[in-house]
């Protein structure tokens, strides 16, 4: 479901779908969590559409290979989103290299889900550091720049788990509920000039969840591979939809899930 909210920018006109490329071409787009999954797939498509893409994640081999494949308008910055200095450095490097930042997509996230009784406190802390603090550090790093330009677009990946919870998903869902609250508040504070989009995907075929260490989770969900999943292309298309709107249209929320039985 797409929820589209019009805002007042009378100097802009509607563009057709065929003009999505025009909307994206030359935009400077910073993506965290760009080394795999939906971030990597979207980065590749945006580069094909002519965007200047800044890839951010921790695994240098993946980022380096992607940057080579994607061509001269792509760069990567090794970034741990849970470190405030890394996020500041990422945004400053993007501005120094390309002159400004049009779009930040806070997409990095982890999902080592477990039951509370298992007491995996370090995994809870890592989820909070990456999924919540990483988003806050991203907003903090880019917002003054966007406000001074009087324009910009911040997207963040929440989850269907940010709207519904499920056994073993308490902390992961908690981080994604927090993302919803952060993004909704951000929109209410700066939404007259800055576009703010939260994406709520259901299950997507990516590396997410490969770090689950809980035997109880594996016993509960059994064969996770048997669940219906979206291809990353579904998220690519959703991001392009949000980025391609005319200047007076801001897509606030995108919720999408695969057909079939889901965990939430
Ligand atoms: N897949 C799903 O079913 C699903 C559903 C709803 C929401 N989501 C959300 O979608 C987002 C993308 O996940 P994905 O499904 O594409 O999974 P993925 O393939 O595991 O990608 C996660 C990305 O986050 C990066 N990352 C993790 N920790 C990081 C850190 N500390 N600093 C910087 N980057 C970090 C990873 O790169 P490095 O390891 O190289 O740092 C990787 O690029 C996440 O926020 C996730 O919660 C996923």
Image (cartoon, rainbow, N blue to C red):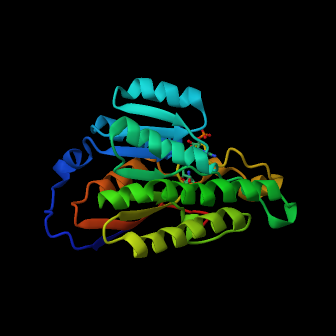
Residue 180, percent across and down? 52, 69
Residue 136, percent across and down? 56, 60
17 or 129, nearer to the observer? 129
Residue 13 position by quadrant: bottom left
Is residue 44 visible to the viewer in this orientation of the structure?
Answer: no
75 or 172, nearer to the observer? 75
Q: Considering the image in quadrants, where does the C terminus appear?
A: bottom right
Q: Considering the image in quadrants, where does the N terminus appear?
A: bottom left
Query: Is 214 above or below relative to 77?
Result: below
Residue 153, percent across and down? 36, 58
Whether residue 110 sits left or right of residue 258 in the image: it is right
Which residue is rendered at x = 43% and y = 45% of the image?
30
151 or 199, nearer to the observer? 151
Is residue 75 visible to the viewer in this orientation of the structure?
Answer: yes
Which residue is rendered at x = 54% and y = 73% of the image?
181
Residue 144 position by quadrant: bottom left
Which residue is rendered at x = 34% and y = 26% of the image?
72
Residue 205, percent across and down? 54, 46
Disc tally is 0
């Amino acid at each position: 479901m797409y929820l589209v909210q019009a805002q007042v920018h009378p100097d802009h006109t509607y563009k057709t779908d065929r003009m999505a490329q025009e909307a994206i071409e030359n935009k400077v787009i910073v993506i965290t969590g760009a080394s795999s999954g939906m971030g990597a797939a979207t980065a590749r498509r945006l580069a094909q559409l002519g965007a200047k893409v800044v890839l951010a994640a921790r695994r240098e081999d993946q980022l380096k290979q992607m940057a080579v494949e994607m061509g001269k308008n792509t760069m990567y910055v090794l970034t741990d989103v849970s470190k405030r200095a890394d996020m500041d450095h990422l945004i400053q490097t993007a501005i120094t290299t390309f002159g400004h930042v049009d779009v930040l997509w806070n997409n990095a996230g982890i999902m080592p889900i477990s039951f509370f009784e298992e007491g995996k406190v370090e995994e809870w802390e890592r989820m909070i550091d990456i999924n919540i603090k990483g988003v806050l550090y991203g907003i903090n790093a880019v917002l003054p720049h966007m406000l001074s330009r009087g324009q910009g677009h911040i997207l963040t990946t929440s989850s269907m788990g940010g709207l519904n919870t499920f056994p073993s998903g308490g902390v992961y869902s908690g981080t994604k509920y927090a993302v919803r609250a952060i993004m909704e508040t951000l929109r209410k504070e700066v939404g007259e000039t800055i576009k703010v989009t939260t994406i709520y995907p259901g299950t997507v075929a990516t590396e997410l969840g490969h770090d689950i260490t809980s035997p109880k989770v594996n016993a509960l969900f059994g064969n996770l591979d048997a669940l219906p999943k979206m291809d990353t292309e579904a998220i690519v298309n959703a991001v392009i939809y949000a980025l391609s709107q005319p200047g007076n249209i801001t897509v606030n929320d995108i919720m999408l899930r695969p057909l079939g039985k889901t965990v939430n």
